[in-house]
Image (spheres, rainbow, N blue to C red):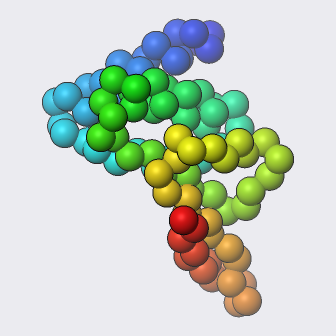
Amino acid sequence: MNLEHLKSALKNEIKKLVIDFNVTEFYVCAQNDFDNSCVECVKEAKSVHPLLKMCLSSLNFTPRVKVDKSFDEIIQYKRGPRRGSTVFCQIR
């Protein structure tokens, strides 16, 4: 499957979720190319549906993660002091 076909399918699914199921919040990551494609598609949907909320959720922020004002909320998870535990931290 090529990237343009995948992005088209993502856009259609996002549109369907917003219109048919009244979804207003999308939680996204930005760790790889697929995640970045999802972020781009949700940004595009927000331009048409300005009440949509996009939250960035990540275990660790790397230089690949481009944080900008299009994210309404940033949620960062950190590994806790005990093995396997996770600490939830909300930013903004």
Q: Position of residue 61 (x, y in %)?
A: 74, 56
Q: Is residue 43 left or right of residue 45?
A: right
- Residue in the foreground of this view, choosing between 13 and 65: 65
Spot the residue most to the bottom: 82
Q: Quadrant of residue 75?
A: bottom right
Q: Position of residue 71 (x, y in %)?
A: 52, 47
Please indicate, yes or no, whether residue 89 appears anywhere in the rendered image. Answer: yes
Please indicate, yes or no, whether residue 13 appears anywhere in the rendered image. Answer: no
Q: Quadrant of residue 87?
A: bottom right
Spot the residue most to the right: 63
- Residue in the foreground of this view, choosing between 64 and 46: 46
Residue at image coords 55%, 35%? 39
Q: Position of residue 62 (x, y in %)?
A: 80, 52
The image shows a total of numbered marks equal to: 0
Residue at image coords 57%, 10%? 4
Q: Is residue 10 above or below residue 55?
A: above
Task: Locate the C terminus by quadrant.
Answer: bottom right
Task: Locate the N terminus by quadrant.
Answer: top right
Residue at image coords 35%, 19%? 12
Q: Position of residue 10 (x, y in %)?
A: 44, 23
Residue at image coords 38%, 46%? 53
Q: Is residue 73 above or below residue 66?
A: below
- Residue in the foreground of this view, choosing between 50 and 82: 50
Q: Is residue 5 above or below residue 13?
A: above
Q: Is residue 34 left or right of residue 60?
A: left
